[in-house]
Amino acid sequence: MRKMKIAGAVALAGTVFAGAAHAQSSVTIYGIIDTAVAYTTNANANGNSVIKMPSLTGTFPSRIGFKGIEDLGGGLQALFVLESGFAPDSGGMGQGNRLFGRQSFVGLKGGWGQVSLGRQVNMTFLATAKSDVIGPSLFSINSIDSYLPNARSDNAVGYLGTFNGFTAGATYSFGRDTSAAGGPSGTNCPGEVAGNAKACRQITGLVGYDGKGFGITSSYDVMYGNTGAAGGLTSSDNKDQRITLNGYFMIGDVKIGGGVIDRRARAAGNVSIDSDLYYLGASYPFSAALVLDGQVLRLNVKGSSNDVTLSVARLTYNLSKRTAVYTSMGYIKNGGTSAIAVDAGGTVGAGKNQFGLMTGIRHTF
């Protein structure tokens, strides 16, 4: 990733805080533009297929970001991140039409770890980062549980620290989602309600260890609802909870990764969700340029026949350090009346199986 360094980034800060004139600071501009053309079968109840350019993601969601660091001395740094997601097919803004919907926080960092305030990825997002070899691709874990690659919290205080291979982190949100745009990027739960401390609160935590050629991570995530919130969480007595256990190990250059996400939710009308999502995958580099990734995912919906199995394969050819082309295939089997599409954000007829094929290009800067 080529980074543009702008020394003395914030001139206004230098004017206002003249006493900090000797501090070293920099700002990095970075981003990804990733888009593809995708074909899927059984895109409706009639079994019709569709060809489209997906908005959400190809292999990685498109973004542009700015991050800055200022050295305050004594091993202490000030930092910020502003990251905006967008849809390259239309140029539209992502994450519920937010300007900096992916991340928007400021914080301090030292040998004791990092503390950050603002909209930020939470511990559920970080928990699967090393074990999920497919990542937030169009055909991926995103298709089955769209919250996982969109696990961010508004109005959050976060901590993350790593010590001798051990990692610990947590976030606490006073109002987990201020957007009413719908979907995983906007669930209409701004919280911060006087007299109701539980309204739209969210707590996430993570512990993990990375050794030589292996790693294991576990996370906890509970979010509460309030009036008008999406997903049936229309009261602060309603909650959605996920516990994850994830791991990976290396065999030479081959990575094997997998995990399980246990989800339990209690929504309005005594509606409950109880499921386990399992995933297992491998990444095999034929060479520095050519990489094959594969993964199988299984959603077990307890007490129901609506179980789902998704199989994904992806071949990526790196034209350079910053540009890659890829082809990905996915096949999803819907049990019972399940209607989970093979492509994230897509459609499928209830109870129908679906095949997807995607080819695209990714450029990072």
Image: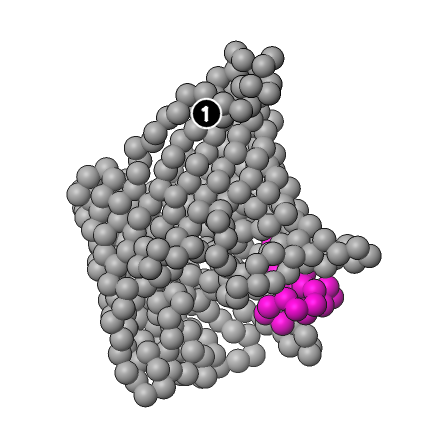
Q: Is residue 82 magenta?
A: no
- Return the x and y of residue 36 as percentages of the image width and height: 26, 59
Task: Report whether 83 appears left or right of 175.
Answer: left
- Residue found at x 54% / y 69%: 275
x and y percent of residue 320 in the render?
19, 39
- Residue 170 shows in this picture: no
Image: magenta residue range: 217-241
Q: Secondary structure at mark 1?
A: loop
Q: Residue lying furthest right in this view?
A: 195
Q: For this rendering, which residue is in front, 234 or 144? A: 234
Q: What number of labels is visible?
A: 1
Residue annotated with mark 1 = 9
Specify whether 279 is left or right of 115. left
Residue 27 coordinates in the image, percent (x, y): 43, 28
Tell me if residue 14 comes above or below residue 249 in the rendering. Answer: above
Q: Quadrant of the C terminus?
A: top left
Residue drawn at x 37%, y 78% as measured from the top left:
348
Residue 165 or 3: which is nearer the viewer?
A: 3
Q: Among all residues in the image, which is located at the extreme bottom?
A: 46
Q: Determine crowd level at label 1: few under 14, some 14-19, many 20+ residues with C-alpha closer than 10 A.
A: some
Amino acid type at image mark 1: Ala
